[in-house]
Amino acid sequence: MSDPEPCRMKHTEDPEEQRDPMEESEESEELSEVEEESEELSEVEEESEELSEVEEESEELSEVKEESEELSEVEEESEELSEVKEESEELSKVEEESEELSEVKEESEELSEVEEESEELSEVKEESEELSEVKEESEELMK
């Protein structure tokens, strides 16, 4: 049997359960919007986490950069110290050479004195030889 009033609501259906299709469409749109916002929020949270990670990495890089700069300063100081060490070694060598030159100078002065004495001795020897000759001549004359 067919229903004599198909367009009418059946008495067994609850009128509150039936919804207006426009109302359902609006609710569906609102639900879609909420879902989209939820997805966007999830994306924003992920991006925020990524940003936090990037910030941490940036801080670590800054620390590494500072350490690298400190290391460069230490290397420069080390090079300067090496140069100072080399200069100090050169100065020590110069001081040693200066001492050696002083000793050579003293020896040279002593040698000069010895040469003077030798010249004096040569003169004395010559005088002695002359005196010996004179003595011999005198002895011969005395004979």
Image (spheres, grey):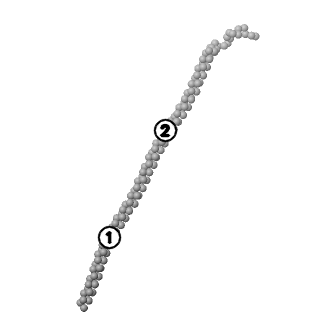
Q: Residue furthest left?
A: 142
Q: Is residue 140 above or below residue 27?
A: below
Q: Which sits in the foreground, 117 or 86?
A: 117
- Pick the quarter of the image with the C terminus: bottom left
At label 2, which amino acid type do we have?
Glu
Judge the density around disc 2: few (<14), some (14-19), many (≥20) Cα neighbours within 10 Å: few
Per the model, the C-alpha gap separating discs 2 and 1 is 78 Å
Q: Is residue 1 left or right of residue 109?
A: right
Asked if the residue at tag 1 contacts the one at tag 2, i.e. Cβ–Cβ closer than 8 Å, the answer is no
At label 1, which amino acid type do we have?
Ser
Q: Residue furthest bottom?
A: 143
Residue 26: image x %, image y %?
60, 17
Report which residue position mark 2 lands on: 59
Q: Which residue is found at the position 37% from the left and 60% from the top?
A: 95
Q: Which residue is found at the position 34% from the left and 64% from the top?
A: 102
Q: Nearer the viewer, mark 2 or mark 1?
A: 1
Q: Is residue 99 above or below residue 117?
A: above
Figure quadrant of residue 116: bottom left
Residue 77: image x %, image y %?
43, 49
Q: Which residue is found at the position 58% from the left and 27% from the top?
A: 39
Residue 32: image x %, image y %?
60, 22
Report which residue position mark 1 lands on: 112
